[in-house]
Amino acid sequence: MKMTTLEELFQNELKDLYSAEAQLVKALPKMAKAASNDTLREAFESHLEETRGHVERLDEVGSAMGLKLTGKKCKAMEGLVEEGNEIISADGEEAILDLALIAAAQRVEHYEISAYGSLRTLAEYMENTEVVDLLQQTLDEESTADEKLTQIAQEIYPMTQNAEASGSDEAEASESEEMETSKSKSRSNGSARSKTSRSRK
């Protein structure tokens, strides 16, 4: 890898981001399928279409600069996708797992927001307004997607509280039932001992 000029740095970052978006296109359908909440599933499906558009925009950037964007693997996105796969295969309460999916998705969004922001700044240094505009469009969409995920998480969170409250009520009911059973056995044993005592007299 050679990075001795601003242009070479830009090219390296652009190829890395292109790989990241391509990996995300493959990962989002799995996350959508794993989501239990309808709104979350729809958000993943909607962002999949946006992400395909992001890949097309990066292709435009590459064409404008005469660059071939394939041939580099974004290891950061590879790790983030793997974390998402771990959640997809996990067991647990639906609402909790949906919140975990959102957390994984927002880590991806924050990575992309950072990457697009840095790339746009480099394009500004290079005074390439066409590329700046293309990158800014995607940056705005990534930020909006992140905000949408936060809103969905805020809608799902009360569901986890209700589930916990329901579980607590069931536990208390079970504990109360066990106590009553224990008391009943104790009274029964006491009655038996009393009858035995009277019989001996």
Image (cartoon, helix red, strand yellow):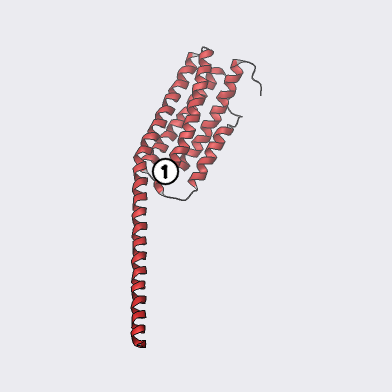
Relative to 50, does residue 40 appear above or below in the rendering?
below
Task: Please give the name of the residue rendered at 44% of the width and 50% of the height, measured from the top-left corner.
Answer: 92
The percent position of residue 24, horizontal first and vertical second, equals 50, 35
Name the foreground residue: 197 vs 38. 197
Name the foreground residue: 10 vs 176. 176
The percent position of residue 139, horizontal first and vertical second, equals 45, 24
Name the foreground residue: 187 vs 167. 187
Relative to 184, does residue 65 appear above or below in the rendering?
above
The percent position of residue 41, horizontal first and vertical second, equals 40, 41
Q: Is residue 20 left or right of residue 201?
A: right
Q: Residue 101: in sight, yes or no?
A: yes
Task: Please give the name of the residue rendered at 53% of the width and 40% of the height, measured from the top-left corner.
Answer: 83
Direction top: furthest residue: 127
Residue matched to label 1: 98
Q: Is residue 57 left or right of residue 188?
A: right
Which quarter shows the C terminus? bottom left
Task: Please give the name of the residue rendered at 34% of the width and 50% of the height, measured from the top-left corner.
Answer: 165
Relative to 114, does residue 125 appear above or below in the rendering?
above
Residue 63 is drawn in which quadrant?
A: top right
Q: Residues within 10 Å of mark 1 (few under 14, many from 20)?
A: many
Which quarter shows the N terminus? top right
Q: Is residue 200 left or right of residue 107?
A: left
The percent position of residue 193, horizontal first and vertical second, equals 37, 80
